[in-house]
Amino acid sequence: MKFSPPLQQATLVKRYKRFLADVQLPDGQQITLHCPNTGSMKNCQFPGGSVWYSLSANPKRKYPGTWELIQNPDGQLIGVNTGRANELAEEGIRSGVISELQGYACLRREVPYGEENSRIDIFLSDGEKPDCYVEVKNTTLLEGDCGYFPDAVTVRGQKHVRELMSVVEKGYRGVLLFLVQHTGIKKVTAARHIDPDYADLLAQAQTLGVEVLVYATSLSSQEFCVERQLPFLD
C-alpha cells in the first residue's frame, strides 16, 4: 500500500480518550489526530517520539489526520492503524507473498459466518477446494526479542478462535494470520502472561487443525507492504 502524498511527520504529545492523539508539527503547531486503534497500544506509544500521519480529503471529518506510524526509542517502526492489517493481508495474498493462501479464485472481505455472529476478515473460495476462512490479527506488542498477541485480555479474540475451530471441524480451512506491524518483531507467540485463556484456546485450535501464519510488514512513510514470513512459537 503506497501513500500519496507520503505520510506527514510530527512529534507525539499524548494519546487520550482511546481515539485521539495530540501531536506537535515541525513548525511548533499542535494538532489532534484520530487514533485508529482500540487496543491498549502497550509498548507502542512514546511521548516525544516521532509519528507519521495521513490526511483525509473528506471535509466532514472533525480530525482530518490519522495516526499511522510511530518510532520507538530503539528506532523501530510500529504501525498503529489496526485498520490497515486486513488491507495489507489482502495485498499480500493477491501479490503471492503469502504463499499458503494462493490458488483461490475469489477473495471477499468481512463475510458473515459462524455460530457466534462473526464476520471473517478474509474469505477465500474456489469450487475445486474447501473454502478458507482467514482471521487477521494486527500484532505490535514487542517484549524482549519476541512479539506477542494479544496486548490485553480479548474476549472477542477468543470468540474468533472458537469460530475457526468450528469451520475446521466442518471440513473447511481455518487460518489465523498474525500480521506484524513492528519492524523489531522477528517471531511471535501467544501472550499467555496477558491472556492465558486465549493462549490455551489457540493451542487447542492448533491440535484441531487451525493453521497459524505470521507475516512481517515493511513500514515507511511512503509504503507499507507484507514482506516475509516469521516463525510462530507454540
Image (tube, rainbow, N blue to C red):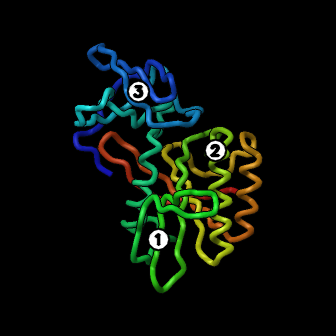
Name the mark on residue 16.
none
Depth check, front residue: 59 or 179: 59
Q: Residue at x 44, y 26 (%)?
A: 20
Find numbered disc 3 in the image and state the secondary structure of the residue it sits on. Answer: strand
Q: Are marks 1 and 2 in contact (CB under 8 Å)?
A: no
Residue type (three-letter) at the residue carrying disc 2? Pro
Task: Residue under label 3, please give it.
Answer: 50
* Label 2 neighbour load within 10 Å: few <14, some 14-19, many 20+: many
Give the x, y percent position of residue 45.
51, 28
Find numbered disc 1 in the image and state the secondary structure of the residue it sits on. Answer: strand
**Left or right: 41 as drawn, with respect to 11:** right
Residue 82 visible, this orientation: yes
* Gap in angstroms between the C-alphas marked 3 and 2: 24 Å
Q: Residue at x 71, y 57 (%)?
A: 202
Q: Are marks 3 and 1 in contact (CB under 8 Å)?
A: no
Looking at the rendered image, the disc whose residue lies closer to the viewer, 3 or 2, is 2
Give the x, y percent position of residue 77.
45, 38
Task: Residue under label 2, please give it.
Answer: 150
Depth check, front residue: 186 or 126: 126
* Gap in angstroms between the C-alphas marked 1 and 2: 25 Å
Q: Residue at x 33, y 39 (%)?
A: 221
Q: Earlier in the sequence, mark 1 or mark 2?
A: 1
* Gap in angstroms between the C-alphas marked 3 and 1: 38 Å
| Residue, far bottom | 128
Find numbered disc 2 in the image and state the secondary structure of the residue it sits on. Answer: loop
